[in-house]
Image: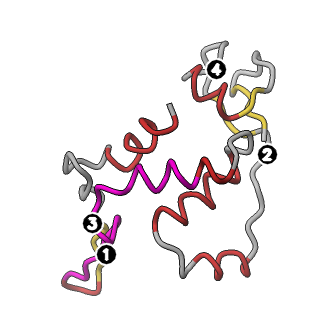
Amino acid sequence: MQFISTRGGMAPLPYSETLLEGLATDGGLAVPEELPHVDAGTLASWRRLSYPELATEVLGLFATDIPREDLARMTAAAYADFPTDVVPLRTIDGGLTLVGLSEGPTLAFKDMAMQFLGQVM
């Protein structure tokens, strides 16, 4: 998969190069050239996956220049210091569900992305 700039002034780049650039070279945001299609059967098959396995599947749609085995190793390492439920769901009053995004090693929501970013860098 290739990534382009929202400003239109950057040649398409693969995931790894885009990640290292940060912003697009023209100052825009780097976005996928096209969004992958995920059908209902694939979504259903993902329900049984652990969080690191699911992260590998989703990231694998975008990070196509990283070998799948490497991506799986990085996601497993990124979420190893989280509890069993990386993103726990807690039912609260009124039928609402609270999503826990601060379960990582620093107890901050940024752990969700930054733990993986540290691995991929």
- The residue located at (61%, 27%) in the rendering is 29
Q: Give the mark nearest the N terminus, 2 or 3.
A: 2
Inter-mark Cα distance, 3 to 4: 35 Å
- In this view, the residue in front, 56 or 13, is 56
Inter-mark Cα distance, 4 to 2: 16 Å
Q: Which residue is mark 3?
A: 83
Q: Give the mark nearest the N terminus, 2 or 1.
A: 2
Q: Which residue is mark 2?
A: 34
Q: Give the mark nearest the N terminus, 3 or 4.
A: 4
Q: Give the mark nearest the N terminus, 4 or 1.
A: 4
Residue situated furthest top in the rendering: 26
- The answer to the question of whether label 2 and label 3 lie on touching residues, with beta carbons closer than 8 A, is no
Q: Give the mark nearest the N terminus, 3 or 1.
A: 3
Query: To which quarter of the image does residue 24 belong?
Result: top right
- The answer to the question of whether label 4 and label 2 lie on touching residues, with beta carbons closer than 8 A, is no
What amino acid is at disc 3?
Pro
Q: Position of residue 38 (x, y in %)?
A: 73, 67
Q: Which residue is mark 4?
A: 24
Q: Is residue 78 magenta?
A: yes
Inter-mark Cα distance, 2 to 3: 34 Å
Q: Position of residue 106 (x, y in %)?
A: 20, 45
Q: Position of residue 87 (x, y in %)?
A: 35, 66
Query: How would you rate the neighbour count of disc 4 (Cα within 10 Å): few for under 14, some for 14-19, many for 20 or more?
Result: many
Which span is picked out in magenta?
Answer: 72-92
What amino acid is at disc 4?
Ala
- The residue located at (70%, 53%) in the rendering is 61
- The residue located at (65%, 31%) in the rendering is 16
Q: Which residue is mark 1?
A: 89
Q: Is residue 50 left or right of residue 1?
A: left
- The residue located at (59%, 49%) in the rendering is 71
What amino acid is at disc 1?
Leu
